Image (spheres, grey):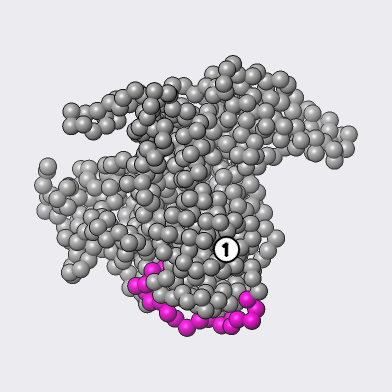
């Protein structure tokens, strides 16, 4: 390997990491919110559907719930699960857990029951905050009885509770995919997330405004989406449950609420832009689009500037480092990078011996500074392997996190992301350890062995493909295995493609040779026997849309969209194309609730009938003319 030049020897580990900013580090995250409450008590804090809550009211509700949690025995270093659908109550609950002194653990109520039980058991959650519309079966895995956010807490004090936690105590625990089949909980302290929250308004001018919160709160991006606005006096607009999958709905919310800042995974940003009307200022309120979660293509930067006329910021960071650690403003026509380190954070690109590599050479991206997580909950060995002593630190005891991401420095100090060095992948913004899926598949009695890989198909970009070896003489029923997996892992961990093998291709050392895994067969009908052809014009239209979106040769009316390789982003395309043919706006959730051609055609007919029933004769004639053009 080439050696560092004298110039690079200074720039790479030192000059490009001169990021020190003197933020006060003593406050906890909730104390920043409390300070904002004192500044703007009557400003609107949170809007969700028809409910609007001002800062003072939000604080009082959270205080009462915090006192209730303290009465249940929680405090500093306790873990409290929060199992609620997105809405005002969710924000109240998260803030209340922090005020109680505990760390919050996001528990998505839509996840499989087995997954919920695992999270609560592995984290040793002291209790769970829950509420309407949430099943309580798996919540019994917590140590204490659930606390309902909708109970009457009016008899409890509504003043700010005295502090129990300090800046080095845990603020939240978020579980990520684990290579051994066990998801691992990342513990982030208040000091780390407070630095990230303070940096954004200073660097990006994100003070005030209207911010759309749409990221599922089981992902660390949601922490900044929720708490950054509440520390700067902004209004937080909460997307409805499931709304993050529906770009047409998001566009309406942005227009109706005057949203000024919105965050996207790049693949979802593309779907969002596709539903906007023509014109450079389709949504004039938007001043800033934040992108993270996957590589940002250069053409998407151009499209976002053309359609929205706003700032586009590319951010990078793993869950192990308080949301994001690098940032850059993207301009059309320029190369897209992940930028340079944020305040009080250091980035290094190193070889296997943790030595910095020369500018332009590929190495592993390593992180250091105040934003590093404390480590993995209850897994000291894994923590020690991933969070190693920082050889570049100016004082002893500093740590470095090895991300496993490959990158290189460009001459101006910005960082170009180049992929992974292991079997972790990112698909549609989800961080996925292939080993976790393989481990669960291998527990099915009909499966002798399983390998999961990424196939770059024509429809919808990269997709997960599972290769299965049968445990006996009979072939593996992939539908049964898929259902088994769906009961145990989140939807984004369920492969879209399935293939049966007699043996796995191996290298000379006996490891699976992923380069020799066959490409999956083209998606086609998965019904038993000959597929049933469309029986009317509506089914024909749905089938044609599926054929276009999924890239299949044809499908029967009883075929399942997701068995054919569909996923949430492709579902948004289905809805958009159907809207061009029919005068109705279907939510993306319709594809999930009616996943066959026949079922979705029924939903379409019903929606059209309801629309037509309330129309005048002239409106009906206009609608029929538009349908004829489509």
Say if the magenta span includes residue 166: yes
Residue nearest the observer in this picture, 575 or 115: 115
Indicate left or right for 523 with 409 as reference: right
Q: Which residues are magenta?
A: 153-172
Residue 477 image point, x, y percent: 47, 28
Compared with residue 150, is residue 267 higher up or lower down, i.e. above or below? above
Compared with residue 449, is residue 414 higher up or lower down, i.e. above or below? below
At a point 43% along the width and 24% down the height, the residue shown is 475
Q: Quadrant of residue 584?
A: top right
Main SS type for the magenta part?
A: loop
Residue 622 image point, x, y percent: 81, 32
Would you name the residue on which mark 1 appears?
A: 130
Residue nearest the observer in this picture, 252 or 607: 607
Label 1 neighbourhood size at 10 Å, few (<14), some (14-19), many (20+)?
many
Is residue 301 visible from the viewing direction of this image? Answer: no
**Quadrant of the drawing holding the C terminus:** top right
């Amino acid at each position: 390997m080439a050696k560092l030049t004298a110039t690079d020897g200074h720039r790479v580990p030192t000059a490009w990491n001169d990021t020190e900013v003197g933020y006060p580090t003593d406050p906890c995250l909730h104390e920043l919110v409390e300070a904002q409450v004192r500044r703007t008590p009557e400003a609107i804090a949170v809007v969700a559907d028809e409910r609007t809550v001002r800062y003072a009211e939000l604080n009082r509700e959270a205080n009462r719930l915090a006192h209730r949690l303290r009465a249940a025995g929680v405090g500093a270093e306790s873990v409290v699960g929060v199992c609620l659908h997105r809405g005002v109550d969710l924000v109240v609950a998260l803030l209340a857990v922090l005020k109680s002194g505990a760390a919050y653990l996001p528990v998505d109520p839509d996840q499989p029951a087995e997954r919920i039980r695992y999270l609560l058991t592995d984290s040793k959650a002291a209790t769970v905050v829950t509420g309407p519309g949430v099943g309580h079966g798996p919540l019994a895995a917590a140590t204490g009885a659930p606390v309902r956010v909708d109970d009457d807490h009016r008899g409890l004090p509504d003043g700010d509770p005295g502090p129990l936690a300090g800046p080095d105590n845990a603020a939240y625990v978020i579980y990520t995919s684990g290579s051994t089949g066990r998801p691992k909980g990342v513990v982030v302290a208040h000091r780390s997330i407070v630095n990230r929250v303070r940096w954004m308004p200073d660097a990006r001018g994100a003070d005030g405004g209207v911010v759309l919160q749409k990221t599922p709160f089981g992902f660390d991006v949601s922490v900044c989406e929720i708490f950054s606005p509440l520390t700067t006096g902004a209004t937080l607009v909460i997307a409805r449950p499931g709304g993050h999958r529906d770009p047409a709905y998001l566009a309406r919310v942005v227009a109706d609420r005057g949203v000024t800042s919105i965050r996207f995974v790049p693949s979802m940003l593309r779907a969002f832009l596709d539903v906007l009307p023509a014109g450079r200022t389709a949504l004039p309120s938007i001043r800033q689009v934040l992108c993270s979660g996957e590589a940002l293509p250069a053409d998407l930067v151009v499209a976002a500037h053309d359609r929205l006329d706003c700032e586009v910021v590319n951010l990078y960071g793993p869950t192990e480092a308080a949301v994001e650690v690098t940032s850059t403003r993207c301009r059309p026509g320029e190369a897209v990078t992940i930028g340079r380190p944020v305040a009080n954070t250091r980035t290094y690109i190193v070889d296997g011996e943790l030595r910095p590599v020369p500018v332009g050479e590929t190495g592993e991206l390593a992180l250091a500074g105040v934003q590093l997580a404390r480590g993995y909950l209850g897994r000291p060995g894994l923590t020690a392997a991933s969070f190693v002593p920082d050889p570049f630190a100016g004082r002893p005891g500093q740590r470095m996190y090895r991300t496993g991401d490959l990158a290189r420095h460009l001459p101006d100090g910005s960082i170009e992301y180049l992929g992974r060095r292991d079997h972790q992948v990112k698909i549609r913004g989800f961080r996925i350890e292939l080993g976790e899926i393989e481990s669960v598949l291998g527990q099915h009695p009909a499966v002798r062995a399983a390998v999961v890989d990424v196939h770059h198909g024509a429809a919808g970009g990269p997709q997960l493909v599972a290769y299965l070896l049968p445990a006996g003489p009979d072939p593996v029923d992939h539908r049964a295995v898929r259902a088994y997996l769906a009961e145990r892992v989140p939807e984004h961990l369920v492969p879209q493609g399935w293939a049966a093998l007699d043996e796995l291709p191996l290298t000379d050392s006996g490891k699976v040779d992923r380069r020799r895994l066959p490409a999956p067969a083209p998606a086609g009908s998965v019904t038993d026997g000959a597929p049933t052809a469309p029986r009317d014009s509506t089914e024909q239209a749905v089938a044609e849309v599926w054929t276009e979106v999924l890239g299949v040769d044809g499908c029967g009316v009883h075929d399942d969209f997701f068995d054919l390789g569909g996923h949430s982003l492709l579902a948004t395309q289905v809805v958009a194309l159907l809207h061009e043919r029919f005068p109705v706006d279907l939510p993306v959730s319709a594809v999930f609730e009616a996943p066959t051609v026949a079922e979705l055609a029924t939903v379409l007919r019903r929606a059209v009938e309801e629309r037509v029933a309330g129309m005048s004769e002239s409106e009906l004639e206009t609608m029929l003319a538009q349908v004829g053009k489509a």
